[in-house]
Amino acid sequence: MDQLKENEGRVALAFYNQQYKEELRHYHLTDEQVMYSGMPMDSIIACEHD
């Protein structure tokens, strides 16, 4: 819990790791958000084929 308070309000970027795949598979955007962004799994699949 102390770590959460310490990192509160901060954003960190991390390289993609397979351990995130299941969470990203269930990530959803609203219809409004989809107009401006893509689904994470679509991007991951595109990168795997590239």
Image (cartoon, rainbow, N blue to C red):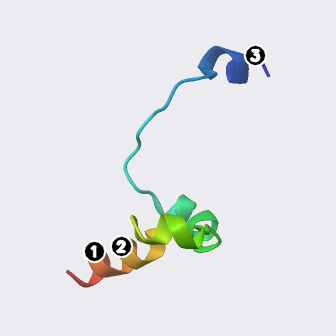
**Residue found at the far bottom of this picture:** 49
The residue that mark 3 highlights is 2
Quadrant, the C terminus: bottom left
User: Which quadrant: the N terminus?
Assistant: top right
Q: Which residue is mark 2?
A: 43
Marked residue nearer the N-terminal end (2 or 3): 3
Q: Position of residue 30 (x, y in %)?
A: 60, 68
Rendered image quadrant of residue 22: bottom right
Image-based side of 32 in relation to 42, left or right: right
Residue 47, numbered circle: 1
Which residue: 49% across, 31% down?
11
Q: Amino acid at mark 2?
A: Ser
Q: Which residue is depicted at the point 40% across and 56% down?
A: 16
- In the image as oriented, which residue stretches furthest toward the front? 32
Q: Residue at x 58, y 67 (%)?
A: 29
Which image quarter: residue 12? top left
Residue occupying the point 45% across, 68% down: 40
Front residue of 48 and 46 = 46
Alpha-carbon distance for marks 2 and 3? 34 Å
Mark-to-mark CA distance, 3 and 1: 36 Å
Name the mark on residue 25: none
Cα distance, mark 1 to mark 2? 6 Å
User: As shown in the figure, which amino acid type bears the numbered disc 3?
Assistant: Asp
Left or right placement of residue 42 versus residue 47 in this view? right
Q: Are marks 1 and 2 in contact (CB under 8 Å)?
A: yes
Task: Name the front one of labels 2 and 3.
Answer: 2
Counting other residues with Cα less than 10 Å from the Cα at mark 1, is it few (<14), some (14-19), or many (20 or more)?
A: few
**Quadrant in the picture for residue 35:** bottom left
The amino acid sitting under disc 1 is: Cys
Q: Is residue 9 above or below residue 23?
A: above
Q: Residues within 10 Å of mark 2 (few under 14, many from 20)?
A: few
